[in-house]
Image: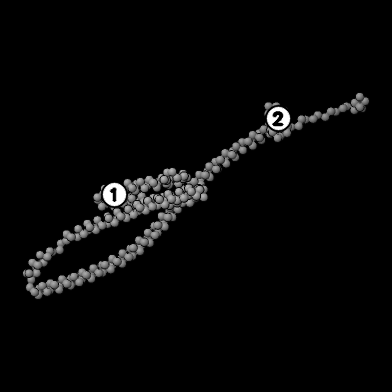
């Protein structure tokens, strides 16, 4: 659908980059299914996350460019382009949901590995505890039980303190992360706006440069014409009888010089 839409060169370039990112995401998730190592899976997910961030930025650029060209396009073309934008957003959201699914699966695998490692502890078995208790007297058993209960109570208190501290630190960390996430989102949006403005400014500078070059050529051509006309006028004034120089249209030729006759004897001329 996207390749048959009437687009400007800028929209077509952004649309092509988005489609390239979508193909890269599809291939990346296909490779992710074949990776068994959790570390490599995490690295692959980070790369795919970067791709999705770039794709989100490109979709924003596509939306801005579409709004700039909305007045120049027909309603039907605008509807088709908006539908294409919504389709790209849905496709990007599907990849985001797929990433969350893989992140959840990867987190469950890490928990299972942690539980398996915790099972191999150095605690004594039940059979060993029975053998030790059979070798002790009743008082020793009571003392040992009281001691174990005190140790257990102390361990429970320490665990409660650790849990409370962990909850407090987790709450504070979550608040800090939320603030940092919001700040990073604002920074990313600001950077996207700056990048889009720089693109527009670069295009405007190129257009101004072309106009200035055209104006300079016109001014130079007019200057040469004026210099030629002035040169012809000067030559006409200096050499008015030079027939090789054509008269300038709209400029009257120089008036011929007049000679006055002088009569020595005017009375004799009158008698004639």
How many other residues sit within 10 Å of disc 2, few (<14), some (14-19) or many (≥20)?
Answer: few
How many other residues sit within 10 Å of disc 1, few (<14), some (14-19) or many (≥20)?
Answer: some
Where's residue 217, x and y in %? 57, 39
Q: Residue at the front extreme?
A: 76
Question: What whole-number distance in Å separates the C-alpha atoms at marks 1 and 2?
Answer: 92 Å
Where's residue 86, x and y in %? 42, 52
Where 139 sits versus 32, above or below? Answer: below
The residue wearing badge 1 is 32
Q: Residue at the bottom extreme?
A: 139
- The kind of secondary structure element at disc 2 is loop
The residue wearing badge 2 is 239
- The kind of secondary structure element at disc 1 is helix
> At 12% across and 72% down in the image, what residue appears?
144
> At 67% across and 32% down in the image, what residue appears?
232
Residue 102: name its quadrant: bottom left
Q: Is residue 102 left or right of residue 228?
A: left
> At 20% across and 69% down in the image, what residue appears?
155
Q: Nearer the viewer, mark 1 or mark 2?
A: 1
Of the 4 image quadrants, the one containing the N terminus is top left
Q: Is residue 236 left or right of residue 51?
A: right
Residue 240 appears anywhere in the view: yes
Residue 122: name its quadrant: bottom left
**Please, which colouring scheme is shown?**
one colour
């Amino acid at each position: 659908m996207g390749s048959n839409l009437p687009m400007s060169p800028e929209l077509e370039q952004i649309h092509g980059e988005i489609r390239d990112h979508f193909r890269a995401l599809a291939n990346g998730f296909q490779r992710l299914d074949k990776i068994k190592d959790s570390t490599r899976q995490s690295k692959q997910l980070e790369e795919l996350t970067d791709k999705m961030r770039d794709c989100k930025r490109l979709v924003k650029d596509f939306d801005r460019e579409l709004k700039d060209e909305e007045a120049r396009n027909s309603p039907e073309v605008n509807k088709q382009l908006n539908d294409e934008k919504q389709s790209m957003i849905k496709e990007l959201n599907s990849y985001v949901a797929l990433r969350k699914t893989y992140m959840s699966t990867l987190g469950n695998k890490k928990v299972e590995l942690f539980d398996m490692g915790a099972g191999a502890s150095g605690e004594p078995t039940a059979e060993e505890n029975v053998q030790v208790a059979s070798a002790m007297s009743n008082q020793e058993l009571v003392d040992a039980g009281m001691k174990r209960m005190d140790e257990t109570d102390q361990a429970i208190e320490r665990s409660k303190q650790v849990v409370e501290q962990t909850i407090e630190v987790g709450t504070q960390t979550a608040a800090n992360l939320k603030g940092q996430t919001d700040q990073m989102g604002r920074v990313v949006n600001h950077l996207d706006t700056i990048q889009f403005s720089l693109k527009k400014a670069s295009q405007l500078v190129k257009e101004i440069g072309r106009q200035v070059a055209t104006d300079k050529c016109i001014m130079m051509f007019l200057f040469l014409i004026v210099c030629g006309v002035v040169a012809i006028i000067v030559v006409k004034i200096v050499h008015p009888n030079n027939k090789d120089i054509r008269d300038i249209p709209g400029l009257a030729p120089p008036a011929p010089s007049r000679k006055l006759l002088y009569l020595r004897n005017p009375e004799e001329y009158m008698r004639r």
